[in-house]
């Protein structure tokens, strides 16, 4: 007999000012022998043990839908029934207590001393300020004191409960009556019970209390399950293993993973599940953030401030993060970030990698060290790029841990783009007819069907387990008449529509609105959209559960969280509506979220998608832009680009005209720099975006106000060695500056003119232009221009001015400029600026053939650029290190390094500099005796220079060709070519090239 506990005046009695009397069950857990452990372990190891204990309690309590109210040193107070009440609060608290004991026992090998805990559980009424207290930390009531007294009374490794709790849980657990005890603070003796465990026959009822539902047996997947279990067993011996389970929709990927979790051989292991979502494939770290918010105790109705507070408590109290680590985690995962400004001295990719590594280590530290763990990434075909990146880092960090990483996905990309190729692969196939028949009969249970009727189900389902179960469910709901008349729906959509038709109109309305929201939803949102009364939500949910269309995702009596039983079911319901119905629903959804204002729980891009589907494209574009800026600011460039593409799709649906062009220009002005940062200035997508932006600028006549767009367009032309076009575009910035002078336009113009002129071999013009930038630049004034142009003009101009001075024959002045570039880069702090300062040092050293300086500076630059994830800087550094090696006689090894750097440079999309690198490589090939290789390389790049106009490289190419002629025994041709090269060097004022020619050929 299970009795529902009822405090005076029902479960909650309001007292005004937010104070309520709530019926709750309190769980109090405490470490045994804490003081002696602290003395024997010391502060650091004791802190690690306490973190492990808190992590066990926190995660276990959250699995049972409780909330951690307080961390009290080595103790922890947890509430069940606040902030969300359910009829099985007491049962879930007792089950959580038993699971904590089990987890503690299983982790005895994780720490230097054995962990042990005592647990007291009490049910009663507490007074809580529900307006100010999200966790119940300030709750006051006898049940809280009684739980603490029961904990003190308990033996290590045991759970004691009070009489009121015993009446609520009935026979769900095996209890031993410990009689009445006098507890401090209570006048009357209190009857106490020790929880011995769960009786074998009580599982069904207990699972029902937890909201569990019957799942069809796993059929036809025995081999796949054994493979997974085998991998799980192996990780305990050999460290992390990764497995990808792929299959088309409906083939049972999630069912297989669920079977792995429930298998007797894995059931006692720790597992956490990250669920990807189609609606949030553009939300950075959505699966991870959702999981951690759930662990932290955040609910669907919590606003950003509350979710931030709960995450901060999880990271600080459970994970023991503090200082910079805590700020990094909050910046990455909290909706509000941290109060600390991020360190700008590292690149955004490096900061994200650092954050991912810190997060991975924190998660891995919270797991048992001596027990195998399951990490499950569900529906990775909807994974967002940031989560995919995190998954890579996590698997790298987990290599020495007993962790089985399982990823489920459809066979489509992005699987191949993000997961380790060393992962094992399980590809699911459709069921054979015999297997499908077995599954159908297991689903139908006692239905009296002949073989022909079942065969028809098999024929319709085509071996897809989801279809088998759905067709069998139709038979259970409608009887066998439809089968007899061969009136079985031909498609899943028709089948689901048949289920909807049997529901009440309000329930159908609820289901359709939910399908427009997404795969997962909550009752409050759907009631707000449909204007249904909230008190009817439970009845509606029950009807949908009964039809197996949805299942709960929250606590048993519900915080209202639900999810469609399968993505295909959601898609079928959504597709069953016509365009107008869908548009109207999306409009209502958008209005519902807009009314929430700053309390809106969804991401900007999700709202934007609803607005776009409602035909409100102008509003959608603004939201997509906001989402893109937010994502880019957080380093999630891939998500930002996806939002911008969606914005452009909405642009195409607006009427032509100036307003549309202005909106598109705003999008392109963000899209271009984002593409440049992620893929380099030479990539064609960046070029196409900038070309379109320039067309819009010309059409709108806005060149004066959009100098960064023009500069970036010229930058792409420079990077791709389209130098005449780069100079032409750069000159337009000069004209803008003449009309409307500004330091920004001035430095953009002179910098672009100077660097293009240097590559064109116009060294005097380069010197004048770059010197003008250096003279204008003031670090204290112009630092903010970096965020606009993504270039630090002072450092960049000093870099090229150092090259120019060196070529002009003043290597000391060149070296001085390079040192100033390096120092300024360190002062400005921007990672790219620091990198350019390093490039300035080793490139000028290479030009003047200072091997020691070139080696020292390029080695430092290689380490820095690899760490900061700057591939073009790393490529150039590697090339110069290889050049140094060839100059010191290691021709084979040096050439290999030069060629590797050269290929990496080309892969970034940069065409500039390639011809100069080719000249140096050809010279080394000649020295190594690879004359045919040198000839082919020179032929190629001499032809390219004729079209690119990169005339700075002509003299080095001609010099290498002359060396090749001499090696081939064609001395007269070598001398003639060297003389022609000397004349060209004189014309370019390139005394460095001239002097080298004279020394090598004695001209």
Image (cartoon, rainbow, N blue to C red):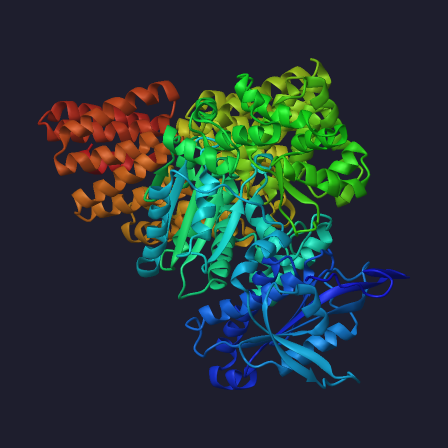
From the top left corner, tell me how far across and down residue 886 is, in percent: 21, 44
Q: Is residue 3 found left or right of 870 in the rendered image?
A: right
Quarter placement of the C terminus: top left
Q: Quadrant of residue 297?
A: bottom right
Quarter placement of the N terminus: bottom right
From the top left corner, tell me how far across and down residue 130 is, in percent: 81, 60
**Which of the pair 267/414 is nearer the observer?**
267
Q: Is residue 890 found left or right of 393 in the rendered image?
A: left
Q: Is residue 47 placed above or below 344 in the rendered structure?
A: below
Q: Is residue 208 visible?
A: yes
Q: Is residue 845 placed above or below 933 in the rendered structure?
A: below
Q: Residue at x 63, y 61 (%)?
A: 92
The residue most toward the left is 969
Q: Is residue 426 found left or right of 958 in the rendered image?
A: right
Q: Residue at x 16, y 47 (%)?
A: 889
From the top left corner, tell me how far across and down residue 743 is, in percent: 64, 37
Q: Is residue 228 placed above or below 69 in the rendered structure?
A: above
Q: Is residue 779 placed above or below 25 in the rendered structure?
A: above
Q: Quadrant of residue 152?
A: bottom right
Q: Residue at x 69, y 13 (%)?
A: 656
**Which of the pair 27/137 is nearer the observer?**
27
Q: Is residue 680 visible?
A: no
From the top left corner, tell me how far across and down residue 605 is, in percent: 65, 34
**Which of the pair 993/165 is nearer the observer?**
165
Q: How many marks?
A: 0
The residue most toward the top is 656
**Which of the pair 724/816 is nearer the observer?**
724
């Amino acid at each position: 007999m299970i009795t529902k506990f009822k405090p005076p005046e029902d479960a909650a009695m309001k007292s005004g000012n937010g104070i309520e009397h709530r019926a709750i069950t309190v769980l109090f857990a405490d470490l045994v022998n804490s003081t002696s452990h602290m003395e024997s372990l010391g502060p650091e190891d004791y802190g690690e043990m306490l973190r492990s204990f808190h992590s066990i309690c926190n995660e276990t309590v959250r699995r049972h839908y409780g909330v951690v109210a307080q961390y009290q040193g080595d103790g922890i107070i947890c509430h069940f029934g606040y902030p969300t009440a359910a009829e099985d609060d007491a049962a879930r608290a007792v089950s959580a207590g038993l699971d904590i004991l089990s987890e503690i026992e299983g982790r005895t090998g994780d720490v230097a001393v054995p962990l042990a805990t005592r647990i007291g559980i009490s049910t009663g009424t507490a007074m809580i300020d529900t307006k100010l207290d999200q966790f119940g930390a300030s709750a006051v009531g006898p049940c809280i004191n009684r739980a603490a007294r029961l904990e003190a009374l308990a033996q290590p490794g045991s759970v004691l409960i009070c009489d009121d709790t015993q009446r609520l849980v009935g026979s769900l657990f095996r209890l031993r009556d410990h009689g009445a005890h006098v507890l401090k603070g209570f006048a009357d003796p209190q009857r106490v019970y020790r929880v011995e465990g769960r009786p074998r026959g009580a599982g069904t009822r207990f699972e029902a209390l937890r909201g569990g539902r019957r799942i069809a047996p796993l059929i036809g997947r025995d081999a796949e399950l054994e493979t997974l279990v085998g991998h799980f067993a192996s990780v305990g011996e050999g460290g992390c293993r990764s497995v990808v389970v792929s299959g088309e929709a409906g083939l049972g990927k999630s069912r297989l993973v669920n079977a792995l979790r429930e298998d007797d051989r894995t059931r006692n292991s720790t597992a956490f599940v990250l669920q990807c979502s189609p609606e949030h494939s553009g939300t950075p770290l959505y699966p991870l953030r959702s999981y951690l918010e759930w662990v932290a105790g955040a609910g669907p109705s919590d606003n950003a401030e509350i979710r931030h507070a709960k995450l901060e408590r999880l990271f600080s109290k459970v994970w023991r993060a503090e200082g910079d680590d805590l700020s990094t985690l909050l910046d990455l995962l909290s909706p509000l970030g941290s109060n600390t400004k991020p360190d700008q001295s590292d690149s955004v990719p490096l900061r994200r990698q650092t954050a991912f590594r810190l997060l991975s280590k924190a998660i891995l530290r919270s797991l048992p060290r001596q027990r195998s763990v399951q990490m499950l990434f569900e529906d990775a075909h909807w994974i967002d790029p940031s989560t995919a990146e995190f998954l890579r880092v996590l698997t790298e960090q987990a290599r020495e841990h007993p962790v089985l990483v399982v990823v489920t996905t459809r066979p489509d990309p992005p699987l191949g783009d993000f997961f380790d190729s060393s992962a094992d692969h399980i590809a699911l196939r459709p069921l054979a007819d015999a297997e499908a028949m077995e599954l159908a009969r297991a689903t139908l249970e006692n239905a009296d069907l002949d073989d022909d009727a079942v065969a028809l189900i098999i024929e319709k389902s085509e071996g897809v387990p989801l279809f088998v179960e759905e067709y069998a469910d139709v038979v259970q709901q409608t009887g066998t008449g439809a089968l007899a008349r061969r009136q079985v729906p031909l498609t899943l959509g028709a089948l689901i529509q048949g289920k909807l038709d049997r529901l009440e109109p309000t329930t159908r309305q609820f289901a359709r609105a939910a399908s427009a929201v997404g795969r997962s939803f909550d009752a409050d949102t759907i009631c707000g959209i449909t204007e249904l009364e909230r008190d009817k939500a439970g009845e509606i949910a029950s009807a949908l559960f009964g039809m197996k269309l949805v299942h709960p995702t929250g606590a048993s009596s519900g915080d209202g969280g639900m999810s469609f039983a399968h993505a295909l079911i959601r898609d079928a319901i959504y597709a069953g509506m016509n365009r107008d119905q869908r548009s109207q629903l999306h409009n209502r959804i958008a209005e519902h979220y807009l009314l929430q204002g700053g309390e809106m729980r969804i991401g900007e891009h999700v709202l934007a998608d609803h607005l776009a589907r409602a035909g409100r494209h102008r509003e959608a574009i603004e939201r997509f832009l906001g989402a893109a800026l937010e994502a880019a600011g957080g380093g999630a460039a891939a998500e930002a680009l996806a939002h911008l593409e969606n914005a452009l799709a909405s642009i195409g649906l607006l009427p032509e005209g100036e307003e549309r062009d202005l909106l598109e220009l705003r999008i392109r002005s963000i899209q271009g720099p984002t593409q440049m940062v992620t893929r380099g200035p030479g990539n064609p997508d960046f070029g196409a975006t900038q070309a379109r932006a320039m067309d819009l600028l010309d059409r709108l006549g806005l060149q004066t106000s959009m100098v960064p767009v023009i500069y970036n367009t010229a930058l792409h032309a420079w990077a791709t060695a389209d130098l005449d076009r780069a100079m032409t575009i750069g000159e337009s910035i000069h004209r803008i500056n003449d009309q409307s002078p500004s330091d920004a336009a001035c430095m953009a113009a002179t910098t672009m003119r100077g660097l293009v002129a240097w590559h064109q071999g116009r060294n005097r013009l380069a010197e004048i232009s770059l010197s003008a930038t250096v003279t204008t630049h003031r670090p204290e004034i112009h630092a903010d221009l970096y965020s606009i142009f993504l270039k630090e003009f002072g450092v960049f101009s000093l870099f090229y001015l150092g090259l120019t001075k060196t070529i002009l024959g003043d290597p000391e002045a060149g070296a001085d400029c390079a040192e100033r570039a390096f120092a300024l880069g360190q002062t400005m702090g921007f990672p790219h600026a620091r990198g350019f300062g390093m490039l300035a040092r080793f490139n000028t050293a290479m030009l003047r053939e200072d091997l020691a300086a070139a080696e020292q500076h390029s080695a430092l630059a290689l380490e820095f650029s690899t760490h900061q994830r700057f591939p073009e800087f790393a490529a150039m550094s590697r090339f110069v290190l290889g050049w140094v090696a060839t100059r010191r006689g290691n021709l084979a090894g040096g050439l290999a390094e030069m060629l590797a750097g050269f290929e990496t440079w080309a892969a970034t999309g940069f065409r500039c500099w390639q011809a100069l690198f080719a000249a140096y490589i050809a010279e080394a090939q000649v020295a190594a005796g690879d004359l045919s290789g040198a000839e082919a390389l020179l032929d190629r790049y001499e032809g390219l220079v004729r079209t690119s106009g990169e005339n700075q490289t002509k003299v080095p190419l001609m010099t290498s060709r002359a060396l090749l002629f001499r090696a081939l025994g064609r001395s007269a041709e070598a001398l003639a070519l060297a003389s022609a090269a000397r004349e060209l060097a004189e014309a370019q004022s390139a005394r460095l090239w001239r002097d080298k020619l004279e020394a090598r050929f004695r001209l």
